[in-house]
Image (cartoon, rainbow, N blue to C red):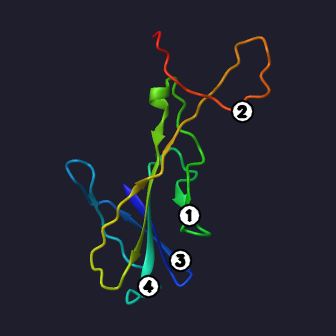
Amino acid sequence: DEIQFCFEQDGNTYSNTANVTSVSMDGKTASFAVTVPAGIDTGSAYTLYAYRSSRKSDKTAGSVLDPADPTIAILPLEQFDYLATLTDQATVFSIWSKKTVEPVMTTIALSFQHMGSMMTLHLKNVGSTAINDLHSLVLQTNPSQ
């Protein structure tokens, strides 16, 4: 897994990446080492943004930090392969962290936040009446099945 980083200090931003070197047995903690870019003064506080995407190798659009403003994560631009059941359709796609790093910190722990899941829902009107005013949709289980 690769983690993308943005270092922000005094209005300047620098990007870098790091590979995960180990993952805990429960899968909740990972270790990685990232180099602080030369433009960051580690004697002063800076903001560190970290982004991990679940972009698959065959999907290359999106799931990156915005090159123009790497404090912003661009979500996937392509959907994953369409699957017929809702259970299989949701895809966990990204986690995000932001932390102010003070000069006294030598080791940094980041708590990542789940950004959500992406789902594609294809609707087909099988009735004989056109529907032109659909404003909302409620998805619920069918108790008869």
Dot 1 amino acid type: Ile
Q: Is residue 108 above or below residue 120?
A: below
What residue is shown at x 57% (from left), y 40% (from top)?
79
- Give the percent coordinates (x, y) of residue 47: 45, 75
- Location of the C terminus by quadrant is top left
Q: Which residue is mark 3?
A: 13
- Numbered disc in front, either 3 or 2: 2
Q: Residues within 10 Å of mark 4 (few under 14, many from 20)?
A: few
Dot 3 amino acid type: Thr
Residues at marks 2 and 1, CA–CA distance in whole angstroms: 30 Å
- Numbered disc in front, either 4 or 2: 2
- The answer to whether the residue labelled 2 contacts the one labelled 1, judged by CB atoms less than 8 Å apart, is no
Answer with left or right where residue 12 lies relative to residue 16. right
Q: Which mark is residue 135?
A: 2
- Give the percent coordinates (x, y) of residue 118: 53, 41
Callout 3: SS: strand
Dot 2 amino acid type: His
- Location of the N terminus by quadrant is bottom left
- The answer to whether the residue labelled 1 contacts the one labelled 4, judged by CB atoms less than 8 Å apart, is no
Q: Earlier in the sequence, mark 3 or mark 2?
A: 3
What residue is shown at x 48% (from left), y 51% (from top)?
115
- The answer to whether the residue labelled 3 contacts the one labelled 2, judged by CB atoms less than 8 Å apart, is no
Q: Is residue 100 above or below residue 129?
A: below
Q: Which mark is residue 38?
A: 4
Residues at marks 1 and 4, CA–CA distance in whole angstroms: 21 Å
Q: Residues within 10 Å of mark 2 (few under 14, many from 20)?
A: few
Residues at marks 3 and 2, CA–CA distance in whole angstroms: 41 Å
